[in-house]
Amino acid sequence: MSTRIDELLRRVQEAALNPSAPLRYGVAVLAALAATDLRFEFQSVFLQTPYWSFGLAVVVAAGFGGRGPALITTSLSAFAAYWFFLRAPGSFAIANPTAAWGLVLFITLTGAIGLLIGSLSESSRARTRAEENLRESETRFRTMADSIPQLCSMADSSGNFFWHNWRWYEYTGLSFEELKGSNWLAALAPEAAPEARAGLQHSIATGEPFEMVLPLRGADGNVRPFLTRAVPVHGADGKVKRWVATYTDISEQRRTEDALRRANSEGLARAAELQAIMDAMPVAMFMTHDPECRYLFGNRRAYELLREPPGSNLSVLAPEGKRPKAFRIIRDGHEVSPYEMPLRRAASTGEAVYDYEMDLALDDGSRDSLIGNAVPLLDAEGHPRGAVGVFIDITERKQNEERLRHAQKLGSIGLLAGGVAHDFNNLLTVIIGSADAALTKYPFCDEVRHILTASERAAHLTRQLLAYAGKGQFVTKTFNLTDLVSRSRELLLASIPKRVDLVFHLPEQELLVKADPSQIEQILMNLIINAAEAIPPQTDGRIEIATGTSDVTAERVRDHEPAYDTRPGRFVYLKVTDNGSGMDEATQAQIFDPFFSTKFTGRGLGLAAVQGIVRSCKGFIEVESSRGAGSKFQVFLPASGKQSAPEGPAASRPGPSRREERGHATILVVDDEDLVRRFACSALQSRGYQVLEAKNGRDALEVVAAASQVPSAALVDLAMPVMGGEELVPILRRDYPGMRIIVTSGYSEEDAGKRFPPGSVCSFLQKPYVVATLLQKVQESLNSGPNEKAPAAA
């Protein structure tokens, strides 16, 4: 109930202080009516003062409504007085002239009084309203200032603070007396007061706004950072009248910023760690955050693999101008479309790609083999938003596998070649030896001569097979390649048709290589004959032979793996170029296969043997050819140092007198092949030697033990059943140190020599052999001491 009364009184008060126009003018009319009524009621009383009620009405109207209502009341009162009290009956004129002057005087006086009182009333109400509005404004300002979360204060033009809001007192715990003037600085942390004072003085002097982060101490003793802003309030004259300052607590913002800064720092650290981990991994990692795979980045190995600078876009689907250098993905011999590449498939379809093996071909011609996985990155709804791929470079592994397969292939071929050479050479030994002996008895027998020629060709084929397998017989020395080619000029000219010109380009400098000169001559001869055969009949041919040096890089070496096992460095080359019919790629892929020929089937080992010799020398061969444009074969051999010294003069060798002393010595022949053993025994007996024979090592030990005297020399086959030469020779060396031991085998001297320690054998006799070679080896062995000479390979 009291609330309603208070509200009613408040409304009445508002109406009194600020009455509306209808009310004010309504009161003016009512006042005039009331004055008229009073004039009628008290007609006799107001004879002497007829206008007193009307004057009172004007005063009331002026005091309540102001000047306008006062004039209205004056007019209505004058009309009422004229109409009801001054007008003559039945006429509009005033009968009494004195009364007329009284009415005029009334209108003049009451009008003036009404205007005066109305003006005073309006001024009073305006002042009252202004004061009320000011009080309301101040109340609203204080309410607003106390309700905002910031601290607020005001200072005069000199910077002396005279007001603070409630939040300021609440936070600092200080009273106005403690903060007025410049004492507000006491709320700051002591170390910040000088800087704050200087900044405020600068703003007061220049009129510029003040802004600074100030540490304010709270009532709880904690100091928090506040963003302090003070702006000037200018008067009508443009001068600063006061300063209004706000203080915003930014401690939470600072904590948030610090937390964000720490989180950002930790995120950057984690990203750096992740990048370091990625860069440290020996695999190529790729990542895209785009289902279309238009932007692709990777780790250090990925950029190295594609030869691109770090941070660049690696996607072939990138916008034009941002793509990497051209590269192709090859799989199963076919180029993979950019839209079918593993990361693109995983990113667009959301399906992982595992164990994807491919070749990466760059525009510089290099090629790397890769295998890896690509898995999609999914968003919260399970939709693909990118992909991650990890690929391992398996180029070296594949090369090693290919090298191993090649080595196994060569090992198998070598094993086959060795076995064939051993067994075939045993047969050829008997055939060649018997034919040679028969030719001695019957020098004019052409049939025997044909047998010997064919057998020698068969022996040459066996040597080629061993050369292809890298097991040929080598007599290694250092020599000048240019000199060897020059000495072969006449032989080469005789080996090619006369219609073919042979042109030499030989430098004067020494081109030293360490190899078997006869094997290099075989290489040269094969290349020249092949070049001549490649020139079509009835065509003027041209074959150029050149020698020189070249520095071979690691990249160039890798291009020839695994066919050749070589190392980068300085090389000497032999180049043979022809203007023949040339070869296509399919033919070039087969030219080093045994018995491959473009002329007819079964030509021989030719280039296969050449490759085997070059491989044994740690060199390599490069071939350039195209159909109709001729061919170029370039053989690279490692360069060597000093040239080997020439052999000593014949006079330094044992003389004939010593050989004659050994003419009737006893020779032990140990061979499991009956025909070979009988041929060797017959040849030695024909020259006056005493011969003991055995079919294996154990039989040989029994024969020697039962003999009346120890044999002076032993001809021992390497491969025999029961006990071979590899087991027999150490026993003979131990029990019979004076015995000269000659090892014979269908294997090469180098291969055979590896099976014996140095100095354990006196000489080596390669199968097949003829009688003269056998007798020479035996004679040389008898003329030397037991340890005077041993094969270089042994």
Image (spheres, helix red, strand yellow):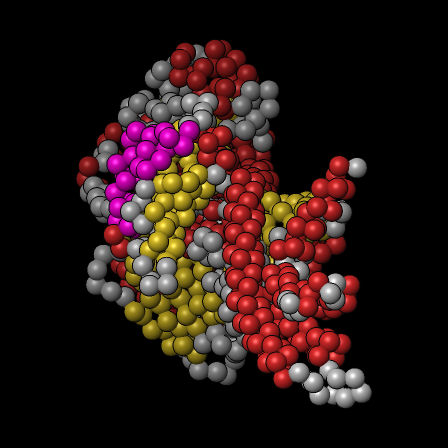
In the image, residue 349 lies in the stretch drawn in magenta: no
Is residue 77 shown to the viewer in this render?
yes
| One can see residue 282 in this view | no
Q: Which residues are magenta?
A: 175-204
Q: Position of residue 449 (x, y in %)?
A: 51, 54
Q: Nearer the viewer, residue 347 or 501?
A: 347
Q: Is residue 607 above or below residue 678?
A: below
Quarter of the image for residue 162 reads top left
Image height check: is 258 above or below 16? above
Query: Residue 564, how many percent across, how many down?
Result: 47, 49
What percent of the width, then of the height, locates residue 443? 46, 53
Q: Is residue 178 magenta?
A: yes
Give the left or right position of residue 123, taking residue 199 as reference. right
Quadrant for the C terminus in the image: top left
Overall secondary structure of the magenta section: helix
Name the residue rendered at 69%, 65% in the picture: 46
